[in-house]
């Protein structure tokens, strides 16, 4: 089997040919890129439903700030998804795999389970049974993490060299749009349902039911798409092996191939810490805005409008940065910007209820976070080499990246409670320093030079 790095990795930025803007934009309309775009939306949609949107629901229901902070722990499946990723790489889903293929079968299966989990969460009540809310949110996170495993593998394997840049930017932008729909969009829906005379609890329930229905966008996309050629070749190469052997090869191969690399542990620590500054502040952004005195609709309108525009521009700006500069330089730019952007919320906490200040803070957060995410995903993609265990290896890396969002951020509510909002967001800038120190160390050790051409 050919090395996937030979068939999917684009040429280095310095060697990339110059193209007109018409040619560059035409790439975004390629069928494979459009498929990745809609799958990115499907991946981004459920994250907030067990995260920031759920936190707003809980805060409105009178749940304590400390308890809200602890709910970051329901993201545990995002950090442990590498444990069942070998099953996704190696096993067939009865009925689904035979009919639509290895990757697409798992896509449809995981999305149907995700819809069921969101509907279950919709039936809970944060005020009366927070434990059941936690269980429902945990199931949503688990199904969402499984979908992410398959989507990441599908994206890495399906895009040829000429479409990698467009696919990466489209995926991240659509992912962020999905998150915005399940935050601002969900909040607007809840308000709309309340305006029809529904109780607050019923309005939240129907808001989540609507979000569950939107997962079908990803399901239809998976059914329309074609199976990646790399996946089909990997399937053919292992067709004579037993399920146990395939799972073992996927699990062992993914871990040993990565851990035998130079400075592997330092690289893994960097993966954990790079987005930590985003995660630490993001855990408390929604409760902060509500506590400051903004209405649910004020927050939703600005996130939906200004935040969406900033996300789209930031996503494509991140693609440009990753294409224009070396991987190490791009990570420096993305890491620094997403850290400093937290100061806009410190300023907002001092200014108070001011819609222009909120718009500026949301813009800064979404723009810089999108830049950092595109560059970070480019780095993670560059670390994955073999289609036999793409899902497992990428799941391991993204699971480690979720450690910051899930475990390291779980105490954010207590920190905010102890320090106050202005100082809290200043602390969010400081927590980015360890990742930048690791970045400097890895750069000095030649880590990024050894990765070869980067999929950006």
Image (cartoon, grey):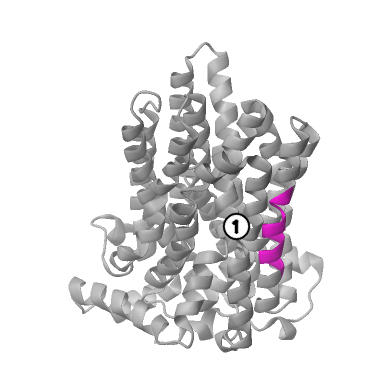
Q: How many marks?
A: 1
Horizontal relation, residue 170 to residue 70: left or right: right
Tell me if residue 9 comes above or below residue 49 in the rendering: below
Furthest residue toward front: 418
- Residue 30 seen in this snapshot: no
Q: Quadrant of residue 147?
A: bottom left
| Quarter of the figure with the N terminus | bottom left
Which residue is under mark 1? 277
Q: Is residue 224 magenta?
A: no
| Quarter of the figure with the C terminus | bottom right
Q: Position of residue 18 (x, y in %)?
A: 79, 78
Tell me if residue 364 comes above or below residue 202 in the rendering: below
Q: Position of residue 175 (x, y in %)?
A: 57, 52
Q: Position of residue 141 (x, y in %)?
A: 39, 48
Q: Quadrant of residue 105?
A: bottom left
- Residue 350 seen in this snapshot: yes
Horizontal relation, residue 120 to residue 29: left or right: left
Q: Position of residue 352 (x, y in %)?
A: 74, 32
Tell me if residue 377 comes above or below residue 105 in the rendering: below
Disc 1 residue crowd, few under 14, some 14–19, many 20+, Cα 10 Å: many
Q: Is residue 334 magenta?
A: yes
The residue at the point 51 percent across, 25 percent down is: 60
Q: Main secondary structure of the magenta part?
A: helix
Horizontal relation, residue 362 to residue 273: left or right: right
Q: Quadrant of residue 431?
A: bottom right
Secondary structure beneath label 1: helix
The residue at the point 76 percent across, 68 percent down is: 23
| Span colored in magenta | 333-343
The residue at the point 57 percent across, 66 percent down is: 377
The residue at the point 50 percent across, 43 percent down is: 414
Furthest residue toward top: 197
């Amino acid at each position: 089997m050919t090395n996937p790095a030979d068939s999917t990795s684009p040429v280095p930025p310095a060697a990339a040919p110059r193209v007109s803007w018409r040619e560059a934009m035409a790439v975004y309309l390629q069928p494979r890129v459009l498929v990745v775009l809609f799958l990115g939306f499907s991946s981004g949609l459920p994250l907030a439903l067990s995260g920031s949107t759920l936190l707003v629901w809980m805060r409105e229901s009178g749940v304590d700030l400390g308890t809200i902070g602890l709910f970051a722990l329901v993201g545990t499946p995002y950090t442990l998804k590498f444990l069942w990723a070998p099953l996704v790489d190696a096993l067939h889903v009865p009925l689904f795999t035979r009919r639509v293929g290895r990757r697409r079968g798992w896509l449809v299966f995981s999305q149907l389970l995700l819809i069921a989990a969101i509907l279950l969460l919709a039936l809970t009540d944060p005020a009366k049974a927070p434990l059941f809310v936690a269980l429902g949110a945990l199931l949503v996170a688990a199904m969402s993490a499984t979908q992410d495993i398959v989507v990441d593998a599908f994206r890495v394997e399906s895009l040829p060299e000429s479409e990698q840049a467009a696919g990466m930017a489209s995926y991240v932008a659509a992912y962020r749009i999905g998150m915005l729909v399940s935050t601002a969009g969900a909040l607007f829906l809840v308000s709309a349902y309340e305006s029809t005379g529904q109780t607050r609890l019923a309005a939240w329930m129907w808001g989540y039911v609507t979000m569950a229905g939107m997962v079908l966008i990803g399901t239809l996309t998976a059914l329309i798409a074609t199976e990646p050629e790399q996946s089909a070749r990997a399937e053919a190469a292992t067709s004579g092996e037993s399920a146990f052997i395939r799972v073992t090869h996927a699990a062992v191969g993914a871990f040993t191939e990565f851990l035998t690399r130079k400075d592997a542990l330092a690289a893994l620590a960097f993966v954990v810490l790079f987005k930590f500054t985003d995660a630490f502040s993001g855990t408390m952004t929604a409760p902060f805005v509500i506590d400051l005195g903004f209405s649910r609709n004020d927050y939703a309108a600005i996130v939906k409008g200004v935040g969406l525009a900033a996300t789209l521009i930031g996503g494509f700006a991140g693609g440009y940065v990753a294409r224009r500069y070396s991987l190490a330089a791009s990570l420096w730019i993305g890491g620094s910007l997403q850290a400093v952007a937290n100061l806009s919320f410190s300023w907002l906490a001092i200014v108070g209820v001011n819609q222009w200040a909120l718009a500026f803070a949301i813009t800064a957060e979404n723009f810089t976070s999108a830049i950092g995410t595109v560059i970070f995903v480019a780095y993670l993609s560059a670390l994955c080499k073999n289609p036999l265990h793409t899902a497992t290896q990428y799941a391991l890396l993204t699971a480690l990246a979720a450690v910051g969002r899930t475990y390291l951020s779980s105490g954010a509510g207590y920190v905010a409670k102890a320090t106050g909002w202005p100082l809290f967001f200043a602390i969010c800038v400081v927590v980015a320093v360890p990742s930048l120190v690791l970045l400097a160390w890895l750069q000095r050790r030649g880590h990024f030079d050894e990765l070869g051409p980067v999929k950006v």
